[in-house]
Image: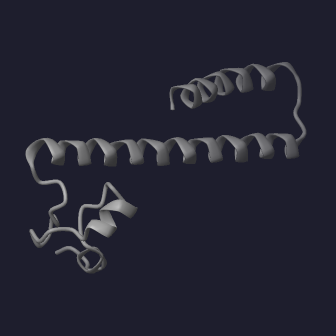
């Protein structure tokens, strides 16, 4: 994530310099924008996954890991094996929260 953040920061600085020194073809600019948006999306997903792992570790520390956050029932071990950061059982997760 830090590498990606660094690359995005460098791109932002260099793209301003590039635009001031010469005209870019609109297709090049669009390609650069698309690539940057993809990188930002990837960074957002990685940050979300990290937050979920940290939350799961906090649940381990406080003894609530593997307990459905909505119903308080144990989460199916197969679900936890497939998705170790699961907060709810499948049935509970499908219901909208009120």
**Image position of 71 with respect to 58: above or below:** below
Q: Residue at x 61, y 30 (%)?
A: 8
Does residue 29 appear left or right of residue 37 in this picture? Answer: right
Q: Is residue 89 left or right of residue 25?
A: left
Left or right: where 38 falls relative to 44: right
**Quadrant containing the C terminus in the rendered view:** bottom left
Residue 68 position in % (x across, y down): 17, 66
State the image coordinates of residue 42 (x, y, percent, origin top left).
56, 45
- Point out residue 88 in the picture as x, y percentages from the top left corner: 23, 67
Of residue 86 and residue 28, the one placed in the foreground of this image is 86
Kindly indicate the quadrant of the structure image that contains residue 9.
top right
Q: Along the line of sight, which residue is nearer the eye, 11 or 79? A: 79
Vertical comparison of 9 with 66: above or below? above
- Residue 94 lies left or right of residue 68; in this view the side is right
Along the line of sight, the residue nearer the viewer: 73 or 97? 73
Percent from the top left, x then y, of residue 89? 25, 72
Residue pictured at 71% horizontal, 47% vertical: 34
Residue at 87%, 34% (x, y): give it: 24
Q: Looking at the rendering, which quadrant does residue 35 occupy?
A: top right
Q: Which residue is found at the position 23% from the left and 77% from the top? A: 92
């Amino acid at each position: 994530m830090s590498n990606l953040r660094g690359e995005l920061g460098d791109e932002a600085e260099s793209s301003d310099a590039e635009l001031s020194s010469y005209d870019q073809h609109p297709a090049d600019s669009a390609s650069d924008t698309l690539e940057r948006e993809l990188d930002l999306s990837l960074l957002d997903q990685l940050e979300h996954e990290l937050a979920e792992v940290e939350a799961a570790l906090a649940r381990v520390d406080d003894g609530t890991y593997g307990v459905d956050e909505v119903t308080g029932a144990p989460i199916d071990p197969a679900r936890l094996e497939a998705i170790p950061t699961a907060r709810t059982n499948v049935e509970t997760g499908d219901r909208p929260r009120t």
